[in-house]
Amino acid sequence: MNPAAPGLKKKKAAIPDTESQERYRQLFEQNPMIMYVIDLDTLSLLEANQKAVRQYGYSKTELLKMSVLQIRETGEQEKLVKYLAEVKAGKNPSAGIWHHKSKTGKKFLLEISYLRLDYDGHDAIIAMAQDVTERVRVEEQQKTENRLKQNQVTEAVIAAQEKERALIGRELHDNINQVLGATRLYIDVAMRDEEKRDELLKKSSANLLTAMEEIRKLSRTLVGPPITHIGLHDSIEGLIDDINQASRLNIRLTMHDFPENDFDEKFNVNLFRIIQEQLINIVKHADARNVQIFLSRNNSEIKLMVIDDGRGFDHKKPRKGIGIINMSSRVDLYNGRMNIISSPDEGCQLMINIPFPLGHSR
């Protein structure tokens, strides 16, 4: 118990002597917490310390002529009356955070705890409070930012799904469908023209192989490789081979002290998808000739770097495309950091650091 002033004591307990009372008064007056005494019968303020005087902006004389309702926001006054009635009835309700106001009308939030006591014959409580306005503001801001970020992630996922559907549609219509359409014509003619039959059937067979290969490539792009069976290193090398065949890029992969079997498939798939996303960005936008991928691990973190010698961009200008949001979301799953360093005509560096062991925060 922290007695607050002369005459302040727990029920059926007395402060022993004048010297002790003075010590208790000093503890009350100079306490860094906001402290005041409330009469449970009249709801008037019986005592307040220096911190309370500064917080509310009233003089001590003014405060001690006021009801506790006058330092609370109007919307919570009825709630406070019911709360204090429960305290007086011997219940022990949780105090929590309340809205308060100062003499100038400034509003703030106080987190309150209390102790019931007898104060010079008054059935009272001593309230002990901390200003948590800034803490609550930061928490609410964080919640808002988290909601916005989650919305961005959701939008990115939906956009990525639509992008995949569009890709499938284009590939099926513009490529595979054309090959199959030509094959059908070959077969129709072959059925009628015995002289051309063998040649047309050979062309049809070749076209079917082409269509099957295009479907395989499309499936691999959308579903990703079976990392469990071939491993992360071979999956990345397969991705590099596919891109090298379709572009003029020279891509090199270096993995140092990275025991991929120590990580689960989900983590390896996320790393693969990040690398895949960045390589696609490079192919589409960078006009690069060379790309280097570095993947390593030490005692405290996993490092991934993807460096290209393309046209670069001004990294100070916001770039919040779907690809970047997707990569950032995957990094956030493991409490990691993602940085992009670039400038016009100077290429681009994607740097990712993920705490190790996985799941540890920085």
Image (tube, rainbow, N blue to C red):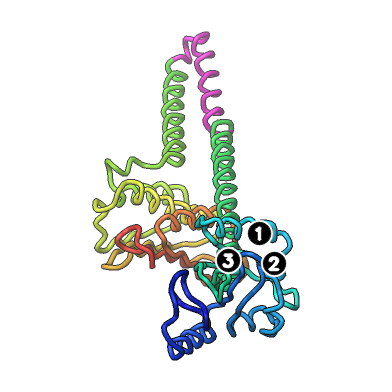
Q: Going by the image, does 232 lie left or right of 78? A: left
Q: What element carries label 1?
A: helix
User: Disc 2, disc 1: CB below 8 Å?
Assistant: yes
From mark 2 to mark 3, how far is it between C-alphas? 23 Å
Query: Looking at the magenta stretch, what is its main secondary structure?
Result: helix
From mark 2 to mark 1, how far is it between C-alphas? 8 Å
- Numbered circle sitting on residue 69: 2
Residue 358 picture location, percent across and down:
33, 58
Within-10-Å neighbours for mark 2: few <14, some 14–19, many 20+: some
Q: Going by the image, does 169 lie left or right of 190? A: right
Say which label, 2 or 1, has the lower sequence index: 2
Residue 104 picture location, percent across and down:
75, 78
Residue 86 picture location, percent across and down:
57, 55
At label 2, which amino acid type do we have? Leu
At label 1, which amino acid type do we have? Val
Task: Say above or below: 26 vs 253.
Answer: below
- Numbered circle sitting on residue 259: none
Q: Which residue is drawn at 69% across and 57% down?
A: 78
Q: Is mark 2 on a helix, strand or loop?
A: helix
Q: Quadrant of residue 221?
A: top left
- Residue stretch in magenta: 174-197
Task: Say above or below: 152 vs 169.
Answer: below
Q: Is residue 193 magenta?
A: yes
User: Disc 3, disc 1: CB below 8 Å?
Assistant: no
Residue 193 visible in the picture = yes
At label 3, which amino acid type do we have? Val
Of residue 329 and residue 201, the one placed in the foreground of this image is 329
Residue occupied by mark 3: 136
Residue 139 picture location, percent across and down:
55, 64
